[in-house]
Amino acid sequence: MKKDYQPVDSEFRKCLEAAVARKQYVNLHYFTDIHEFMKVMVVVKNILTKDNMEFLAVSNGEEVRLDHIIRIDEAVSPFYAHIYDFSCDC
């Protein structure tokens, strides 16, 4: 599911940058390129730019497109504000 990259909202980007600065575990919810919902607890390492897209580099080795991030801890991306928490922590 490749779609055109959409730059993220400046307020949400500040939340991502704060997570990089803290170097602590965060709960990260995102969609993969094939639209799989992922929920992981990771340390945010850096924000990278590749091919005119921005990615969040995290401690599990993944690079997540910023416009695919649903939420980081309690901060919800404006792109996905309409999505309810449908994950199961059972």
Image: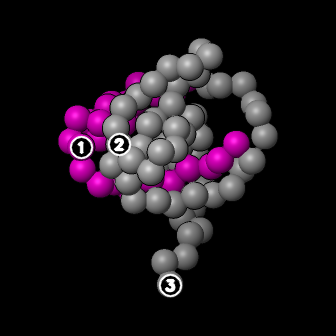
Residue at 47% x, 45% y: name it. 61
**Earlier-in-chain disc, 1 versus 2:** 1
Q: Quadrant of the N terminus?
A: top right
Element at badge 2?
strand
The answer to whether the residues at label 1 and label 2 have Cβ atoms under 8 Å apart is yes
- 18 is within the stretch colored magenta: yes
Toward the right, the furthest residue is: 1
Residue bearing the label numbered 2: 44
**Span colored in magenta:** 7-33
- Residue pictured at 24% horizontal, 50% vertical: 24
**Percent coordinates x, y for residue 42 in the rendering:** 38, 54
The amino acid marked with disc number 2 is Val
90 sits to left or right of 10: right
Q: Quadrant of residue 13?
A: top left
Query: In the figure, 42 relative to 55: above or below?
Result: below
**Nearer to me, 57 or 15:** 57
Q: How far apart are labels 2 and 3 at the CA level? A: 25 Å
